[in-house]
Image (cartoon, helix red, strand yellow):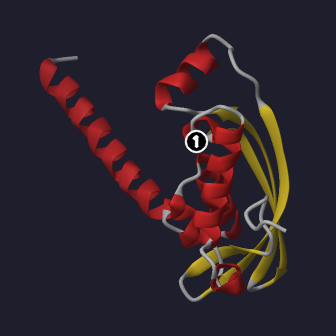
Amino acid sequence: MDSGNKLMVVASVVIVAFVLQVVLIFADRHDSPGKAAVEFSKAYFKQNECMTYRLCSDVLAVDEADVVGDYINRVADEARANGFKPRWMRMSLAHTEVEVEMLDENTAQVHLTASSLRSVNPVFGIVSKVFQLGEYYEVDETLTVVKEDDGWKVCGQPYALIEG
C-alpha cells in the first residue's frame, strides 16, 4: 500500500469519526425523564445550585423559600457541627442506573440506583478510586418527574431537599 492510500484511509477515518461525534452530540440533547433525574441527582449530591434548573415549579414555590439554598446551608451547618468544612459533604455519583416508568405522557417515576463517593475535589475522587480508599454509599431513590414547558423536571420530595 503506498502512502497516498494510507493518507486517504486516515482522512476517511477522521471524517467518519467527526460526523459520528456531531450526531452523538445532537442525540444527547434530547431531554428525557431519566436524564433529568440523573442531572438533578448529580447536582444534588455535589451540592451545586444548578439543581434548581431541574426542579419543577411546585417544589420551587414551597413557602416562597429558597429550597436549594436552604438545603445547601443545612448541609453546611451539619458539616460544621461535625468539625468539617462544608465541601467535605460533597459526593459524586458512579455506576448510575435508571429505570423509567411512564405514568402518562407528562409524568414518570424514575427509579435511580447509584454509588456515591466523597468528592471534596477532583483529585480526591481520582485517588480514592485508584487506591480504593474511601467508602461507597448506595443511593436508591424513586423520583417523580413531570414535563413542564421547558423540559422534564423533578417534583415531589426528592431525597432530603425539603426539610420536613
Amino acid type, residue under disc 1 in the picture = Pro
Identify the residue at horizontal 68%, vertical 15% (top origin).
133
List x then y, in percent, for residue 124.
54, 23
**Depth check: 158 or 162 in front?**
162
**Depth check: 143 or 164 in front?**
164
Task: Give the residue furthest to the left.
Answer: 4
**Depth check: 98 or 93 in front?**
93
Identify the residue at horizontal 43%, vertical 63% (top origin).
26
Which secondary structure, mark 1?
helix
In the picture shown, does residue 61 fall above or below 52? below
List x then y, in percent, for residue 135.
76, 24
**Residue 60 seen in the current view:** yes
In the picture shown, does residue 104 fall above or below 86? below
Quadrant in which the N terminus is drawn: top left
The total of numbered circles placed on residues is 1
Quadrant in which the C terminus is drawn: bottom right
Identify the residue at horizontal 59%, vertical 54% (top origin).
43
Q: Is residue 152 left or right of residue 126?
A: right
List x then y, in percent, for residue 78.
71, 45
User: Badge 1 local density, few (<14 within 10 Å), some, or many (20+)?
Assistant: some
Q: Quadrant of residue 74?
A: bottom right
In the picture shown, does residue 127 fall above or below 36? above
Residue with the mark numbered 1: 86
Identify the residue at horizontal 59%, vertical 51% (top origin).
47
Q: Is residue 8 left or right of residue 36?
A: left
**Residue 31 seen in the current view:** no
List x then y, in percent, for residue 22.
36, 56
Task: Give the residue furthest to the top.
Answer: 131
